[in-house]
Amino acid sequence: MKKFITVLLMLFAVVALAACNGESDTKEIAVIMPSADHGFLGESINHAEAATERLAEEYGYEFQFLISDDIVEQASQIDKVIADGVDVVVLWPHNGDELKSAAQAILDAEIPLIIYDRLISDFDETAELLGDNVTIGEETGEYFNTYFATELAAGEVNILEFKGDNSSVPTQRSDGFWSTADDNFVKFQEWSTNWSKDTAQDQMETFLTTATQAEVESIKAIFTHDAEVAAGVLAALEGYTGTYTINVELVSAVSASRELLALFDHYEALGINQVVYSFSPAMVVDAIQLGIDVLEGETVSGQYLVPTEMVDNSNYEAFMEGPVYTLRYSLED
């Protein structure tokens, strides 16, 4: 009996020691994202945090959810989760290539890595999930071709381009657009907005007040990479009080936000049509699910592209009744 009690006490001691050392059989997922510097990212964080907590609880896993203001802080968070011995990482990099060394450390620690939204070039992650940015660009170019078919047949058509930042996302969208856009489209000028409505509005207002009359009046369309950016451009066009004639007929965007869709009829009445390609903040949940799938022992590899939908003045009301839009705003219900 004494021997049995001694063995039992030793077993309790081992369990207690493991608990003190933080050892656990429960697997853990880490989700690492940039902090919100614009509305789309803020919505994404809300969806990601809610999904991480919900899925971890549903499947019985522990989790860490971390956001950062810059690349240095994000790299430090990566060091932390590696040291903590998490079992899978879902990473939305601030800028993929600048975070390459830190991301490689995850793989060197033999931790599966799901990259979301922004690519890391020449990198062998476990899997990556992102919007179909190339297709978004290609379809925007094709839409422009159809919309301006008569003008293109007659000669060149000047347009402006408003990009997001210098990550892989705007690069893919721009490359896609110019791969399908008619050769008679001329990019008169381009800007990088850092996804900011205010920045885009300032840039558009500056162009309208500093360019010549001939230059301003030659612009027929504006290719933007984001709904907030488009909203800033449209506000500048509407607020212009100069003597030049605004001849912009079409403004494109990505991410069919409630705020932008609500203005479709308003700007159509002012002579400006819009086309938007869906890119929902809620799709980050798919990346987190991939991380859970890894913990569940499923095979996860390669590139996963979230499809896009075209939304213009002819179908935006129907889109607002559909599943992509409904899921996007489901957390507010």
Image (cartoon, rainbow, N blue to C red):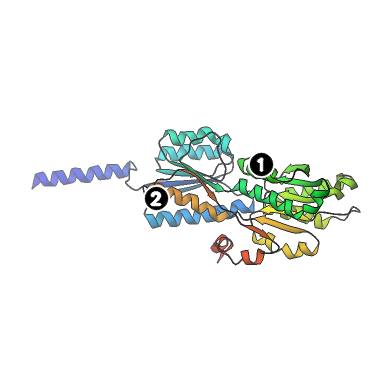
* Label 2 Cα neighbours within 10 Å, binned few <14 / some 14-19 / many ≥20: some
User: Could you tell which of marks 1 and 2 lies nearer the N-terminus?
Assistant: 2
Residue depicted at x 39% and y 50%? 62
* SS label for mark 1: helix
In-image side of 85 versus 251 (left or right) = left
The residue closer to the viewer here, 276 or 18, is 276
The residue closer to the viewer here, 292 or 45, is 292
Residue 215, image x and y in percent?
A: 86, 45
Residue hosting label 2: 62
Residue 127, image x and y in percent?
A: 47, 43
Residue 279, image x and y in percent?
A: 60, 53
For residue 41, above or below residue 325 = above
Q: Amino acid at mark 1?
A: Asp
Q: Quadrant of residue 43?
A: bottom right
Residue hosting label 1: 175
Q: Quadrant of the C terminus?
A: bottom right
Residue 225, image x and y in percent?
A: 68, 49
Residue depicted at x 72% and y 55%? 231
Q: Is residue 208 visible?
A: no
For residue 319, above or below residue 240 = below
